[in-house]
Image: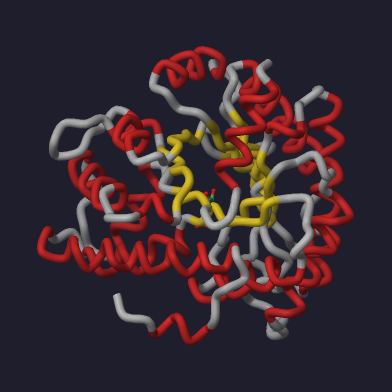
Amino acid sequence: MDKEKLNSIATNLSKPPKGILAADESTNTITKRFDTINVESNTENRRRYRELLFTSENLNKYISGVILYDETVYQSTNDGVNFPQYLKSLGIIPGIKVDTGAVPIEKNSPEKITEGLDGLQKRLEEYNSQNLEFTKWRAIIDIDTNNNIPTEYSIELNAHSLSRYARIVQDYEMVPIVEPEILMDGAHDIETCYKITSNVLKKVFEALNKQNVYLGGILLKPNMIIAGKKSTEQASTDEVATMTLKCLNENVPKDVPGIVFLSGGQSNELATQHLNKMNKDSKDSHWNISFSYGRALQQPSLSSWMGSYSNTERAQKELLKRSKLNSDATLAKYSIEDENSQL
Ligand code: 13P
């Protein structure tokens, strides 16, 4: 394992003022997103949409890397340049989602385990040849305190898969993004999110250490500590930042080069405000603190596009705007008034 190489990729991906664009929606997920704008989810429309994102002018000022989905790796720009190659030519590092999605842990169980270890080594060999430099694996943990969910069993199974994935990926000289996502769908309060996230992170790092994963060559992609969407008591920005930093400081080893948050269904503005506040409050942090957002970067762009060529410019400006605002947040330079800036 080339530790220096892995550390350098992970550092470059997470170093302010840049962050990661997650454009790795599976066909199923992108179809749901396209349904909201009445666009048919066929191969060409998915290619056109990803092309729109990647060819936005100046994207490389704010975006260090893009996570792709398998189909996109083999697609090209209108000029015939293959997407990973195109991104590389802009200095943007191409990466790939390598998990194959989550299934019930047992028949009829509401808890899920992420799959994708079978055949992973073969797929990584192929992705190496496509010049992809990092990977992502997402484990999902739901909170339902009335039914004692999550169980220790599901946390341990997911921690094991995440660590096994990370270990295999490092053998192929690629950086694994380790993403244990505690969903924000429930009615739980912020304290419950804090307790469960702490336990999950503890178990994930225990498992990573057991598998001898080189922590200097991974990125952690966690959820922020927030109350569930259905909770009537939503925490303030200050509280979210304080609790999230506390949770990370207690559970994430200093050797990890960067923390790149997921947005998880937060509004675009809140995802940016929270990131900004965390960077403000942790000027001397050991980790880079940045973003790896999907929805919180793409949503305004997708709604402006509506599948039409005539909306391309506007949609690209929307992506650029959110990318710039989140980039400012990595430097703690974002202010809510910037939301009104001209496109
Ligand atoms: P969101 O920012 O939309 O949560 O997506 C990030 C991601 O990559 C989820 O796996």
Spot occupied by residue 343 in the image (x, y as percentages of width and height): 29, 75
Q: Is residue 110 visible?
A: no
Q: Residue at x 68, y 47 (%)?
A: 258
Q: Is residue 291 left or right of residue 74?
A: right
198 above or below 215? below
Spot occupied by residue 94 in the image (x, y as percentages of width and height): 43, 35
* Residue positioned most to the left: 310
123 above or below 70? above
Q: What's the coloring here?
A: secondary structure
Residue 85 found in image quarter: top left
Q: Is residue 200 visible?
A: yes
Spot occupied by residue 133 in the image (x, y as percentages of width and height): 50, 28
Q: Is residue 137 left or right of residue 156?
A: left
Spot occupied by residue 164 in the image (x, y as percentages of width and height): 71, 25
Q: Residue at x 52, y 84 (%)?
A: 336
Along the line of sight, which residue is nearer the eye, 274 or 186? 274
Q: Is residue 69 left or right of residue 293?
A: left
Q: Residue at x 80, y 48 (%)?
A: 200
Q: Residue at x 56, y 37 (%)?
A: 136
Quadrant of the image containing the N terminus: top right
